[in-house]
């Protein structure tokens, strides 16, 4: 195994091992391949993965037979992160997708209106985030592909309805995730589960909190559920707390934006590089160009915990909105 593989590679590799369907395996493999830096040391690994990928594609083709399409649950990742909306029927998942993106899902007071996942892009300040609406959770039907899609996400947004069995909805949603070996990342430290678990950040949107009348119900629900998971009361109907919801999504994704600046020039404030909280100058260098990981000498930073233009080393930890000049 070559050294210097980025953390995203190992994350995709875990998703690959856990994938229950061929299409999920294919998408995880494609992601692994896209995260490997291209140099001599990784030639063999890339060739191995390419072989596996073509084998899987062949299997999928054989299984499906001619004329059938790729699974609807296979959705290309786009933007700085994927947020999957999940929850029981009629809680307002499709309404949220429609309110925050340009997607046009079917919204209806009749339950079970959504049959397949639908993606849309949401802008939070200068970051594009993919939101994916999904068919309702079910306690009766086994839905492996839905859980593969959930596993491929960077954040799970559980949607519950403050006007109907809210507490039960939350408990059942978390139980179904648990049955599929998905546990909120918040609980990682406490978990002593022996199974192979995927820990993914989870937050909860408590929808249909239409006016002050429901605020008390929300407070009661909050106390009763006593969950440390972030909870945001919203109303799609009355557009309540959308800014708070977006802020919490951004926070829960644990991403930071870094603006790069060529030496002696102004920083490019249009297109941030997206990194994970806790990432360093070295991680940034790898994102800007794979050669930079090896050739980087020093860097200068404008932003948090530094004086303007401070020289820093590879291990310097970056913060949201830092501006960085890399020196080779
Ligand atoms: N009062 C109120 N109704 C809402 C709100 N958001 C959505 N609804 C209504 O709730 C119903 C269900 O909304 P959908 O967005 O289709 O719910 P869903 O979770 O996608 O439903 P499924 O696809 O069946 O899982 C529709 O009649 C919406 O108009 C809200 O904030 N307040
Ligand atoms: Mg729906």
Image (tube, grey):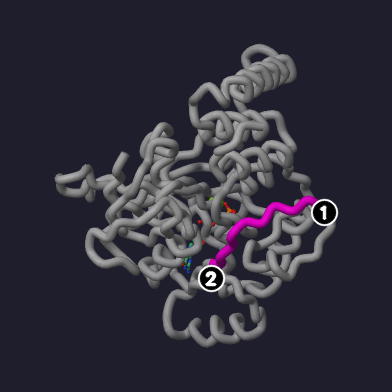
What is the number of the mark on residue 195?
A: 1
Is 189 placed above or below 218 here? Answer: above
Q: Nearer the viewer, residue 38 or 148?
A: 38
Q: Quadrant of the C terminus?
A: top left
Q: Quadrant of the N terminus?
A: top right
Asked whether residue 5 is drawn in magenta, I would say no
Pick out the residue farthest to the left: 265
* Quadrant of the image occupied by residue 166: bottom right
Q: Main secondary structure of the magenta part?
A: strand
Mark 1 secondary-structure assignment: loop
Pointer 2 residue: 206
- Residue 165, percent from left and from top: 66, 73
* Quadrant of the image occupied by residue 303: bottom left
Write the residue at 32% across / 50% down: 299
Q: Residues within 10 Å of mark 2 (few under 14, many from 20)?
A: many
Q: Tell how many labels.
A: 2
- Point out the frontmost of discs 1 and 2: 1
- Residue 87, percent from left and from top: 62, 59
- Residue 145, percent from left and from top: 69, 40
State the separation of the CA atoms marked 1 and 2: 30 Å
* Residue numbers of the magenta segment: 196-204
Is 200 placed above or below 148 here? Answer: below
Mark 2 secondary-structure assignment: strand
- 8 vs 104, left or right, is right
- Residue 90, percent from left and from top: 58, 59
Mark 2: C-beta under 8 Å from nearest atom of ligand 1: no
């Amino acid at each position: 195994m070559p050294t210097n593989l980025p953390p995203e590679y190992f994350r995709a590799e875990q998703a690959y091992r856990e994938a229950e369907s061929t299409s999920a395996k294919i998408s995880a493999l494609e992601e692994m391949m896209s995260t490997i830096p291209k140099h001599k040391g990784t030639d063999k690994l890339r060739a191995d993965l390419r072989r596996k990928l073509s084998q899987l594609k062949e299997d999928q083709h054989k299984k499906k037979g001619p004329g059938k399409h790729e699974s609807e649950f296979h959705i290309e990742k786009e933007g700085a992160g994927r947020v999957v909306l999940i929850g029981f029927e009629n809680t307002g998942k499709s309404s949220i997708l429609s309110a925050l993106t340009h997607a046009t899902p079917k919204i209806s007071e009749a339950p079970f209106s959504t049959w397949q996942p639908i993606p849309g892009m949401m802008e939070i300040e200068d970051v594009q985030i993919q939101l994916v609406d999904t068919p309702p959770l079910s306690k009766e039907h086994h839905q492996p592909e839905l859980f593969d899609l959930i596993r491929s996400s960077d954040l799970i947004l559980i949607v519950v309805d403050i006007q109907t069995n809210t507490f039960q909805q939350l408990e059942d949603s978390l139980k179904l995730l648990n049955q599929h070996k998905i546990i909120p990342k918040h609980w990682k430290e406490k978990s002593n589960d022996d199974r192979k678990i995927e820990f993914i950040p989870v937050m909860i949107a408590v929808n249909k909190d239409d006016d002050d009348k429901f605020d008390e119900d929300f407070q009661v629900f909050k106390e009763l559920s006593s969950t440390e998971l972030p909870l945001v009361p919203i109303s799609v109907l009355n557009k309540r707390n959308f800014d708070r919801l977006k802020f919490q999504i951004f926070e829960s994704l644990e991403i930071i934006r870094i603006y790069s600046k060529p030496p002696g020039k102004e920083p490019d404030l249009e297109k941030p590089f997206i990194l994970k909280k806790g990432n360093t100058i070295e991680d940034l260098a790898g994102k800007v160009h794979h050669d930079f990981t090896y050739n980087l000498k020093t860097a200068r930073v404008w932003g948090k915990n530094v004086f303007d233009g401070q020289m820093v080393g590879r291990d310097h930890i970056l913060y949201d909105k830092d501006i960085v000049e890399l020196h080779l």
